[in-house]
Image (cartoon, rainbow, N blue to C red):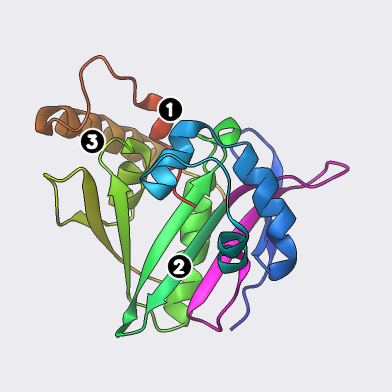
């Protein structure tokens, strides 16, 4: 099943295109990765990393039918479109109803709603391909990703570990491009509750700022 490209806008008014990643996008992946902070790279690989290897570039841009799909976000209205985010799923061979997901948002465009857009697009496509559950492994300090997945119905199975396992029900979500005032209020309340619960459980120290990670999921490619 092919993913149908579509254009939308971020909270700051930036026009973007969401489309499926192909092997021809290796250079775009390299460009985007080079713009990630060391913190975002660490959250993606759960280890310190400098560059992507040739084999990783092959793997991250490969498509395997409906079992491995990646959706990329590119800026529009500029002379040369820039890669600003990517989301992917890889289906588990022994559990075809489940897939592991990963999402990366460039630091410069976080908190603009791109994480939610990518997750909605990925969820919609996966549901049409027979996937009913997403799985993610997230660093406990990646509060943005934890918050994003929780807002989509994610549940934590290893709350006391440094690397947290999260399961997420998959549904055919409509890609709403605007948020009502009621939804905005609910989202703000969710973020406030999440901050309180994470601090109480020891995920985040009282002196650590987490606001920059709350809207778009931090980074996970």
Residue 24 makes an appearance in the image: yes
Q: Residue at x 20, y 17 (%)?
A: 206
Q: Earlier in the sequence, mark 2 or mark 1?
A: 2
Instruction: Locate residue 45 relative to residue 133 in the image: left or right.
Output: right
Q: Residue furthest right?
A: 79
**x and y percentages locating residue 138 in the rendered image:** 31, 49
Above or below, 145 against 121 in this view is above
For the residue labelled by badge 2, is the local secondary structure a helix, a strand or a loop?
A: strand
- The residue carrying mark 1 is 212
Tell which tag, 3 or 2, sits nearer the viewer. 2
The image position of residue 196, as x and y in percent, is 18, 28
Task: Give the residue at x 24% y 30%.
Answer: 195
What span is in magenta? 61-85
48 and 91: which is toward the camera: 48
Tag 3 secondary structure: helix
Q: Give how far apart the Cα atoms at labels 1 and 3 are.
A: 14 Å
> Which part of the image, by quadrant, shows the N terminus?
bottom right
Q: Nearer the N terminus, badge 3 or badge 2?
A: 2
Mark seen at residue 194: 3
**The residue positioned farthest toward the top in the image shown:** 207
Residue 94 part of the magenta-drawn span: no
Quickly name the residue at label 2. Answer: 89
């Amino acid at each position: 099943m092919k993913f149908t490209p579509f254009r939308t806008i971020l909270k700051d008014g930036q026009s973007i295109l969401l489309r499926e990643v192909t092997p021809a996008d290796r250079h775009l992946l390299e460009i985007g990765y080079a713009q990630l902070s060391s913190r975002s790279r660490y959250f993606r690989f759960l280890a310190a990393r400098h560059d992507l290897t040739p084999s990783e570039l092959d793997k991250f841009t490969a498509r395997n039918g409906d079992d491995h799909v990646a959706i990329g976000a590119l800026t529009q209205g500029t002379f040369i479109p820039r890669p600003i985010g990517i989301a992917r799923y890889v289906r588990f061979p022994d559990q075809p109803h489940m897939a592991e997901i990963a999402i990366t948002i460039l630091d410069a465009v976080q908190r603009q709603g791109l994480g939610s857009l990518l997750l909605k697009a990925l969820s919609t496509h996966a549901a049409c391909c027979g996937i009913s559950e997403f799985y993610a492994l997230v660093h406990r300090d990646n509060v943005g990703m934890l918050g994003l997945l929780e807002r989509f119905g994610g549940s934590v199975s290893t709350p006391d570990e440094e690397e947290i396992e999260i399961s997420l029900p998959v549904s055919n979500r409509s890609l709403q491009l605007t948020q009502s005032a009621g939804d905005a209020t609910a989202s703000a309340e969710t973020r406030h509750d999440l901050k309180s619960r994470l601090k109480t459980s020891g995920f985040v120290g009282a002196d650590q700022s987490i606001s920059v990670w709350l809207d778009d999921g931090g980074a996970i490619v």
